[in-house]
Amino acid sequence: MPLIVHVVDDLLSAIQSVTLSTYILMTMLAMGMKLSASEIVQSFRRTRVILLSVVANIIIVPAAAWVALRIFDDLPTAAVIAIVLLASAPGYAPIMAARAHGDLAFSTTLIFLLSAVSVVSIPIVTTLMFSSEAAVDVDGWAILRTLLIFQLAPLVLGMSFRRPRKAVAERVAPKIANVALALVAIAVLAYAVDVARADGTPLVDLGWLTFVVWIGITAVALVSGYVAGGSDEPSRRTLSLHTGIRNGGLTLLIAATSFPDTGAEIGIIALVVVMYPMAMALTLKWTGQPVVANETAD
């Protein structure tokens, strides 16, 4: 019996690792294939909003997490890792932004900008935030390596492929993205099996306070993104959602590669389940409130 259990554990671990890493690679590749260089360049002329977008995502959200973890300093280690990684991750909500009548060109720019900046910011932010956590050992270089391989490289590759083969890229990208979604569904199912087989109650062990803290951080993210979006309503909606929805898939990959056997992956999935309904509520509200972008956006 112990041998069977060991085999099942190894199989689940392999499924989680392969599906997560492939999901991120394919997602970033498909994303790169859909990014328009001209739209990115055009949006980058809005210097103030671009800078505020980085501040909201890279400074304000991690700062909110840092303050919360200083106030509630007795959260389980798995919860702390999950909160720090999600708060440090870039925002990613193109589908919600589109449904909320957001600025699609700005959304494209945010995907590129936050993906590129986070390659540097995540290792720095996580190292700083974990420096006071004796129970957490963080390797910033390992996180940087993961981000370069699984996030930046396929993003650049996708954009490079799109430039000479735009029609092919636009046709293939949705198919790659659909396969990626299937892979992350398999990964989440494998984690669900892990939870069902685990001794004790991993979700209950996170504690109700963990969820309250994350609800507060997500609220700060949504509000700060909206405020930082300038005077243009579509841009405000876009930045709010791109700030409030953290990249759970990327966070899971970092947790699996840099923080194995901590229970952080289960914590991340649980917090993502809390995060999405909050953003979805705003999306549904804005879906029924179409707007026209200001001609003189910031």
Image (cartoon, rainbow, N blue to C red):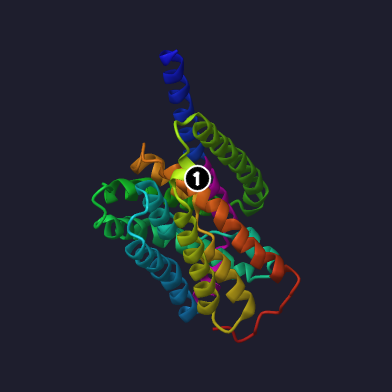
Q: Nearer the viewer, residue 161 or 80?
A: 80
User: Where does residue 116 sit, x and y in percent of width and height?
Assistant: 42, 59
Magenta segment range?
23-45
- Residue 230 visible within the image: yes
Residue found farthest to the bottom: 296
Q: Nearer the viewer, residue 160 or 52?
A: 52
Q: Which residue is at a point 45% across and 67% down the rendered structure image?
A: 57
Q: Quadrant of residue 260?
A: top left
Q: Is residue 31 magenta?
A: yes
Total count of labels = 1
Which secondary structure type mostly characterizes the magenta part of the structure? helix
User: Where does residue 281 sit, x and y in percent of width and height?
Assistant: 66, 64
Q: Above or below — where is 155 with respect to 109? A: above
Label 1: how many Cα within 10 Å (few below 14, some 14–19, many 20+): many
* SS type, badge 1: helix
Left or right of 16 on screen, residue 68: left
Q: Amino acid at mark 1?
A: Ile
Left or right of 208 on screen, residue 241: right
Residue found farthest to the right: 288
- Residue 163 visible within the image: no
User: Where does residue 121 sit, x and y in percent of width and height?
Assistant: 35, 61
Left or right of 172 on screen, residue 132: left
User: Where does residue 167 sit, x and y in percent of width and height?
Assistant: 66, 52
Locate the C terminus and report the quarter of the image it occupies. Answer: bottom right
> Which residue is disc 1 drawn over?
24
